[in-house]
Image (cartoon, grey):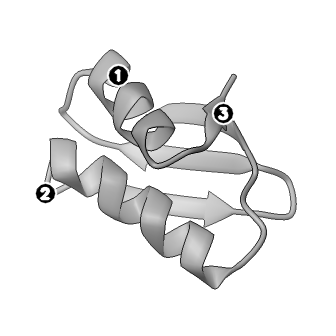
Amino acid sequence: MLTLEVEGMTCGHCERAVTKAVQSVDPAAKVAVDRSSGQVAVDSAGDPQAVREAIEAEGYTVR
């Protein structure tokens, strides 16, 4: 399980964009987004760096 702090998520569209970005790396990934805390939990066999880069490519900052 990978837990990321993602900045800039403000709405449901943001949650879907982050989920879609993660699933572009691993279509079977399970993603739980909590935009109020900025936490994204990812259960994936994908490369963690690729997951980070995919989220950042959507315009979000990953810490």
For the point 61% across and 43% down, which residue is it?
60
Q: Residues within 10 Å of mark 3 (few under 14, many from 20)?
A: some
- Residue 22 point in image, percent of width and height: 33, 49
Residue 48's label in the rendered image is 1
Mark 2 in CB contact with mark 3 (< 8 angstroms): no
For the point 86% across and 64% down, which residue is it?
36
**In the structure shown, which secondary structural element does the residue marked by tag 1 occupy?**
helix
Residue at the spot of label 2: 27
Earlier along the polypeptide chain: callout 2 or callout 3? 2
Earlier along the polypeptide chain: callout 1 or callout 3? 1
User: How far, Cα to Cα, is label 1 from label 3?
Assistant: 15 Å
Amino acid type of disc 3? Thr
Residue at the spot of label 3: 61
For the point 63% across and 82% down, which residue is it?
12
User: How far, Cα to Cα, is label 2 from label 1?
Assistant: 14 Å
Q: Is residue 53 left or right of residue 63?
A: left
Earlier along the polypeptide chain: callout 2 or callout 1? 2
**For residue 49, which quarter of the picture?**
top left
Residue 37's label in the rendered image is none
Q: Is residue 61 left or right of residue 13?
A: right
